[in-house]
Amino acid sequence: MPVFTYRATTREGAIVEGVVDAPNEHAATERLKNSGVIPLKVRSTDQGKKKPFHISLRIGRQRDQVLTFTTELSSLLGAGLPLDRSLNILCEISVDREMKVVISEILRSIREGGSFSDALQKHPSLFPTIYVNMVRAGEAGGVLDTVLDQLNEFLESAKELKDSVVSAMIYPAILVLTGGISIIVLMTYILPRFSVIFDELGGSLPLATKMLLAVSSFLSSFWWLFLLAAAGLVIGLRSFIRTKEGRYARDRLLLRLTGEIIRKFETARFARTLGTLIKSGVPMLLALVNAKDVISNRVIAQSIDAVTKGAREGRGIAVPLAQTNAFPQLALSMIKVGEETGQLDVMLLKVAQTYEKSLRTEIRRFMGVLEPAMILIMGAVIGFIVISMLMAIFSITELPF
């Protein structure tokens, strides 16, 4: 039987940790609840061995902190503890100093008479607008614990989707980096030494070798100019992309190059966000505004304005979405069925699940083509350099002494 580690709290606020045998995570959680403790985190002992390699960044750490905070707060509220007591327990058990300060400020704001959503809104770097609006809807409907459960599922799905995309891009990035460094070393360090040898021996060199040595000589003598031009290009592109026109042009280009992947990625994010918001009780128009904010591609995001206008006019969202031509046909059909049956939130979440699964397949297929193509290109460049040098050596050895 699988073994699960757990972290729980008693109703008096004492933290307990240990292991429990259970057939699955849900059964382990129920067994802990029946024992009189409130489970905060239940995890299989095998999960730690299967974590994919990822680059640790500050923004990623903040996302993990919010997910942990949401999971633990949902567990405490679901066990019947009041909000201030739950926050007080989370403040005491938090191991991150910054998160402890944030929770204490939220707790102080609530004790001074403010709402939980208003307290969260004071920390926009940690809690985005969609998070705050869902909590506000939960407070208004008296179902904060249920909304936090939905938020927890939403954050976990979003994290899993983003991590799968990042993990898929790690190997191509390493391949480009190592290949680029190899070419730079060959061009600026190895070839100049061959150039000296060829000059001393004299003779006519093949055209490919002459071209290669000319490029190598230029890079060796004017490497600073190359770096300056590269830095200027990067700075110029970054400045252009920061403008509204630049972001739109970049997103339009990306949509043309990798259309299916981006469409599926944005469809999954939009559908999960909108479905979760509607299910949490957020009004449709506000939910559409929040769902638009999570779409990173400006071309697709701009089309949501027409959908919002259609919803405001009472035409629903299925027809306006179809008119944008920004989303796949299957997603539009599922959304239309959900709207007709009065189960739009359920159908949107099914759309998200469908396209998250399809996206992973599409990424694997894309990487299956991209990785060999990159290896082939890098191999062709390095092979050209090596063959050019060998041709020069062979031509020199044929010269009479």
Image (spheres, rainbow, N blue to C red):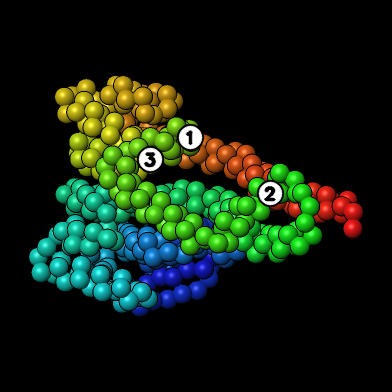
Q: Which of 37/172 is in front?
A: 172
What residue is drawn where x is 47% and y is 58%? 225
Give neighbour class at mark 3: few <14, some 14-19, many 20+ (Cα, 10 Å): some
What residue is drawn where x is 45% and y is 32%? 256
Residue under circle 3? Answer: 250
Q: Say above or below: 383 vs 358.
A: below
Q: Is residue 291 visible?
A: no
Numbered disc 2: secondary structure: helix
Numbered disc 3: secondary structure: helix
Q: Which amino acid does label 1 sit on?
A: Leu
Q: Which amino acid does label 3 sit on?
A: Arg
Left or right of residue 217: residue 320: left
Residue under circle 2? Answer: 210
Q: Which of 208/34 is in front?
A: 208
Q: Can residue 196 be seen in this view?
A: yes
Numbered disc 1: secondary structure: helix
State which quadrant residue 336 falls in: top left
Residue under circle 1? Answer: 257
